Image (cartoon, grey):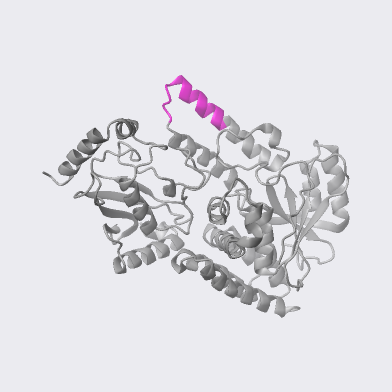
Amino acid sequence: MHKTMGPTALRRLMTEYRELTLHAPEGITAGPTTEENFFEWEALIEGPQDTPYEGGIFPATLIFPKDYPLSPPVMKFTCEMFHPNIYQDGTVCISILHAPGDDPNMYESSSERWSPVQSVEKILLSVLSMLAEPNDESGANIEACKVWRSDRKHFDETVRSTVRKTLGL
Amino acid sequence: MTVTPVPVPTEAPIPAAATIAPTIAPITTGAVADPVAAGAVANLVGATAAAAAAGQGQEAQLTDEQILTQMQAIKDEEANAHPLVDHSVDLMELAQEYENGSEAFKKKIENLSDTHDRMRRSRGDGNCFYRAFAFAWFERVMLAIKSKPELHVNAVRTIEETKDLLLAAQFELLAFEDFYQVTLETLQNLVHFTSEELLTAFQNDEVSNSIVMHFRLVASAFLKTHQDDYAPFLEFGQTMDEFCSMHVEAMGRESEEMMLIALTKATHVSIEVAYLSGNQSADEVNFLPFLPDTAPYMPPLVLLYRPGHYDILYRKSHCLEGVI
């Protein structure tokens, strides 16, 4: 499949994969699902400490466009996630996954945006901080936003129960 | 080094006059004075209205993401009707575009044709300035490869030096090396390129967009490494990093004068921009020079600006060898 995809994209994804393998940031594992297709990755993200996500390991997919890194990938959790910035279908909605001008959630002008200077590593680090600090200004899951704002205890409980599910407990 | 803020001679604001940026609200027909962009914008406005109507009618069946996807599709369709860089055409073709248009445009094009004979269109995809600049420069170098080989030597050295500039601006090698390589290789290949091969390279998405991206990063790196000079021109307390990330480093973001100044100075290549607007008060086209800090080693590249869009202009004095 990747033969028809962009050579620049493939070269870049291979470089990023090598870098991530050599210097993986703490709490993150990511790489192509199969060696035949570098345009579909799987990632595992550890829930950050001192957050209700702590202890969880969350699987996600990253699908890259053929003109990557000119355009950003789409990231989607494949497990149940209760979070203000994650759609019910698992799609992650944070500013770094959107090019400037592409503004589904009217991000603040100072928020970090997609451009080729970003990378898979930077996306995953942003997702880690998103888990630690939800942004209820640009919500994707309205219910999660409401609960996070009005009843933090209930929010934490709900998240912990999804974490237990993820771990198969 | 100091910066002279360049005055804008037209009535239209330069940065976002007719941007085809997919922001939904600010596109108003009043801002569009340019038929090139106007078609695309009209389509977008139509699509937005349709999308909005659909949303109301069916209880917002379309998500924001879907609307953006649709608008992107319309934009792509519009863009695909035109190559990234086109064959050069006689300036009279530009005049024909305005046959039923305003007298002011016609008069200005007539005046322009005293000194310029051809033009070359760059696709209106938000990258037109960078693409037009790169093509015009590389073409100039290629056509002079035998008569003035030093232009090629200078250009190669300049591009090689941009690597240091990018590193100095804290860009990661991983983030720019592919674009840098493609740009350098294309430039090195000019030694044996024909005009047709150069055009083919610039019409290829991979090559053309890599070169655009490299020049974007160069402009960004120049602004970041000269913050003291340029940050005072930023609005709303924006930092230079924010400005570059929002307006320079991402594909499809329109350029404004700060980017022209940055790229001119970073590459030591001078530009003259012919501002063609519907301004009734003058028959002459205004030319704005963008000069490097060092003495220019070749005549300026000439770009044609119509609100929201850049194309390449050819001045009569240095005729193209073998019109493409």
Residue A36 lies in the magenta-colored region? no
B251 over A108 or under it: above or below? below
Spot the residue most to the left: A169
Which of the pair B80/B232 is nearer the observer?
A: B232
Q: Quadrant of residue B101?
A: top right
Which quadrant would the N terminus of chain B be assigned to in this image?
Answer: bottom right
Quarter containing the C terminus of chain B: bottom right
Q: Position of residue B162 (x, y in %)?
A: 58, 71
Q: Count the marks: how many? A: 0
Q: Is residue A91 above or below residue B323?
A: above
Residue B135 in view in this figure: no
Whether residue A35 is visible here, answered yes or no, is yes
- Which residue extends farthest top? B57
Give whichever of B182, B29 is nearer the camera: B29
Question: x and y percent of residue B231 in the render?
Answer: 62, 56
**B283, A10: nearer the viewer:** B283
Q: Report x, y in % for residue A96.
A: 43, 49
Name above or below for residue A21 compared with residue A58. below
Indicate yes or no whether the magenta region holds residue B51. yes
Point out the stretch of residues depicted in magenta.
B47-62
**Residue A118 location in percent, x, y?**
44, 57
The dominant secondary structure in magenta is: helix
Choose top left, top right, bottom left or bottom right for residue B100.
top right
**At x 37% / y 52%, what residue is drawn?**
A126
